[in-house]
Amino acid sequence: MRHNHSNLLDKFESYLQANAPSIETVHPTFDIALQTMTKACAKRFRPMLMLSVVQSLNPLLLQNSLAVALAIEIFHTYSLIHDDLPSMDDASFRRGVETLHETYDEATAVLVGDALNTHSFFLIANSSLADHTKIDIIKQLSLDGGISGMIIGQAVDIYFENKTLSIDELKLLHTNKTAKLIASSLKIGAMICELEESATQTLNNIGLDIGLLFQIQDDILDITLDEKKAGKSTNKDEFKNSFVSLMGLDGAIDEADRLADKIISKLDMLEPNLKDGLENLLKGYLHRHHL
């Protein structure tokens, strides 16, 4: 099967724009605030991982999977909104637009994040999938996006500002904060298609490696790109542990290249159609880095 990443992204983007959370209310700005970060230009990487798995393994389930893909995207968007809050990273720019607490106020940003978090599970529960599949998806997303994953990762990240971690501790931090939700996106695609356990575990391991690679790339971009090119606030890692601060720029680039090679090797373990679908999606990320 020929994989067309662009067509799949267009299909999901159209679905997102038509089905983004919205609320009729007397509040003059909440509905537009609710939609701003979801509808803003973004890579849609996590839902595309999930949809690429479904498209590769059982394309007949693709249409019924779009609501779950949207749930993953708005869950990720909630995490970005909260990550940017003054009490956390205090960022002023995200996805090419001003952050919600800058445009409106901190309370609005917190409530929009809360709304997107809870609405993601509403979307999964109401999707057109088997009940046992929906329960498994809810378990997976709440596990990797909750206290056993993203939340504890964020808590450790904030607590250890101005305190130096080891490389292994930093990898554990970002495995929780970033990588588990990426791995979860792949595993949810596998759940929808009822993929056998060993291949699902391989996908999980690939997702964890992708998450660490993304974080290293993000740390590199933080010191090498300005806000306009990055699409978000940069130079925010001055007081935080980062792969660049602990390994130096050359060391971080070498680690990124090592991880990219590791991911390529693990993709070879997948059945050909799934491998091709993910390689097509990842080809822009698995490149050698140069200063």
Image (tube, rainbow, N blue to C red):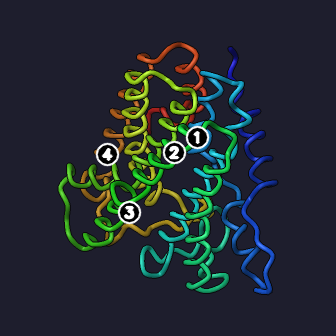
Mark pair 3, 2: CA separation = 21 Å
Q: Give the class, few, some or many, for how many residues have Cα within 10 Å of label 3's Cα (few <14, many ≥20).
A: some
Mark pair 3, 4: CA separation = 30 Å
Mark pair 1, 4: CA separation = 49 Å
The amino acid type found where label 3 is placed reads: Ile
Q: Relative to 17, is 254 above or below?
A: above
Q: Which residue is mark 4?
A: 250
Mark pair 1, 3: CA separation = 27 Å
Q: Which quadrant does the N terminus fall into? A: top right
Q: Is residue 254 left or right of residue 190?
A: left
Q: Which residue is mark 2?
A: 135
The amino acid type found where label 4 is placed reads: Asp
- Front tag of 1 and 4: 1
Q: Give the class, few, some or many, for how many residues have Cα within 10 Å of label 1's Cα (few <14, many ≥20).
A: few
Compare residues 280 and 31 and report the one nearer the observer. 31
The amino acid type found where label 2 is placed reads: Ile
Q: Residue at x 57, y 76 (%)?
A: 92
Element at badge 1?
A: helix
- Front tag of 3 and 2: 2
Q: Give the class, few, some or many, for how many residues have Cα within 10 Å of label 2's Cα (few <14, many ≥20).
A: few
